[in-house]
Image (cartoon, rainbow, N blue to C red):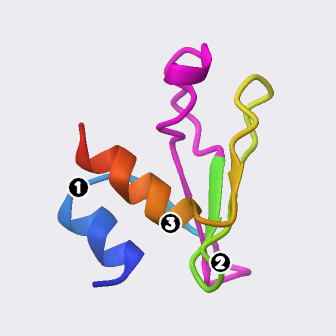
Amino acid sequence: MTFRDFLQKERIPFHQSFSRPEEIQLKCPFCPERGNLDDPRFLLSITTATGAGHGWHVGCGFKSRRAVFLTMEKLRRF
């Protein structure tokens, strides 16, 4: 199962990048635990080819080379 398949199966909204097909943007599940309010914008970018991800919300700062794994684990708990 790919990361995209997982998101679709769990009905988690995401955006697929048109210019970079290996990049997916979704709402950051790490922001609330880092003191940010639930943000409706798709500010977590994940490159599925490498597994790396970066949160673009100013207060969050999530960055990981294991973003696919960490995000899947986090979203399974919801």
Dots 3, 2 in contact, CB < 8 A = no
Q: Amino acid at mark 2?
A: Phe
State the extent of the magenta-drawn residues as a range.
Answer: 17-43
Q: Earlier in the sequence, mark 1 or mark 2?
A: 1
- Left or right of 30 on screen, residue 55: right
- Left or right of 32 on screen, residue 66: right
Quote the CA–CA distance across marks 1 and 2: 20 Å
Quote the CA–CA distance across marks 3 and 2: 19 Å
Q: Amino acid at mark 3?
A: Val
Q: Which of the 4 quarters of the picture holds residue 10?
A: bottom left
Q: Amino acid at mark 1?
A: Arg
Circle 2 is placed at which residue position? 18
Q: Nearer the viewer, mark 3 or mark 1?
A: 3
> Which SS class for mark 2?
loop
What's the residue at 76%, 36% (across, down)? 61
- Residue 11, label in figure: 1
Residue 59 at x, y percent in the picture: 75, 22
What's the residue at 62%, 64% (across, down)? 46
Circle 3 is placed at which residue position? 68
Q: Report the label total.
A: 3
Q: Is residue 30 magenta?
A: yes
Q: Nearer the viewer, residue 70 or 54?
A: 70
